[in-house]
Amino acid sequence: MGKRIVVKIAELTKKHKISMRELSRLSDVRHAALSELANGKRESISFSHIVRIADALNIEDIREIIDLADDFEKD
């Protein structure tokens, strides 16, 4: 069992009471990229996107955006 990075886009939009489109506009990160991250279809995020999201939402703790979770591999 390993670890994986979890990008908490859905939790962020809910907590800050904004839509993904609004987060996209505020952060200048493509809506499609945010949607793919929220739906688990994308497994990577660039550091610049993390910084833009943090700036857009006035986040100072990176753990509000990303987290480390156990990776349950399928046999």
Image (spheres, rainbow, N blue to C red):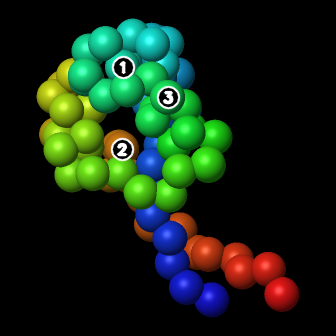
* Residue matched to label 1: 24
Decide: few, some or many residues near mark 2? Use Cα within 10 Å; few <14, some 14-19, many ≥20: some
Q: Earlier in the sequence, mark 2 or mark 1?
A: 1
Q: Nearer the viewer, mark 2 or mark 1?
A: 1
Q: Check the picture and name the quadrant holding the C terminus.
A: bottom right
Say the numbered circle drawn on residue 65: 2
Q: Earlier in the sequence, mark 1 or mark 3?
A: 1
For image coordinates 50% across by 58% down, the residue present is: 43
For image coordinates 35% across by 51% down, the residue present is: 45
* Residue matched to label 3: 32
Please state which amino acid type lies under the numbered disc 2. Answer: Ile
Tag 2, which secondary structure? loop
Q: Check the picture and name the quadrant holding the N terminus.
A: bottom right
Q: Nearer the viewer, mark 1 or mark 3?
A: 3
Q: Nearer the viewer, residue 57 or 52?
A: 52
Tag 3, which secondary structure? helix
